[in-house]
Image (cartoon, helix red, strand yellow):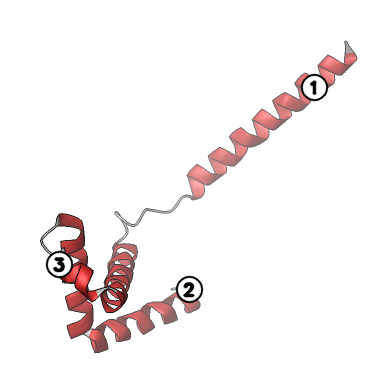
Amino acid sequence: MSCQLKASSSSSRTKASIATTLVLITQNAKMTALFNFQSALLVLLLFICTAAYCHQLFPAFMDRKKDSPVVGVAWKCARIGERLSPYISVCCVIFAVRLFIGA
């Protein structure tokens, strides 16, 4: 009988600690990239850089499939990354500095 009481009390403690953790996570949760403008810009910038790199690796595939919805968006971002590469790289450096500073 005492073993069952210990098991149930530790189970209730575990449930209470999980509930407390969930409350703390919910209270300290930050906005997602969809609602935070800086994070949305960072996601867009990283997508442009990734698409330009993938276009460098697989140019025939991306050029052949540029009319499809998914690869077409990646192809357009790759063009932006190729043609505006100095500006894209400056933006990457600015975001990296802001990330290290913590602003």
Instruction: Give the quarter of the image for residue 12.
Output: top right
**Mark 3 = which residue?**
64
Crowding at mark 2 (Cα within 10 Å: few <14, some 14-19, many 20+): few
Relative to 3, say whether 23 is above or below. Answer: below
| Residue drawn at the location 73% of the way across and 25% of the way down | 11
Q: CA distance from mark 3 to mark 2?
A: 42 Å
Q: Position of residue 33 (x, y in %)?
A: 34, 57
Q: Position of residue 66 (x, y in %)?
A: 14, 65
Which disc is residue 7 wearing? 1
Q: Secondary structure at mark 2?
A: loop
Q: Does label 1 or label 3 sit earlier along the sequence? A: 1
Say what amino acid the circle numbered 3 marks: Arg
Tell me the mark number nearer the camera, choosing from 1 and 3: 3
Q: Does label 2 or label 1 sit earlier along the sequence? A: 1
Tell me the mark number nearer the camera, choosing from 3 and 2: 3
**Mark 2 = which residue?**
102
Q: CA distance from mark 2 to mark 1?
A: 45 Å
10 left or right of 15 in image? right
Instruction: Give the quarter of the image for residue 94.
Output: bottom left
27 left or right of 81 in image? right
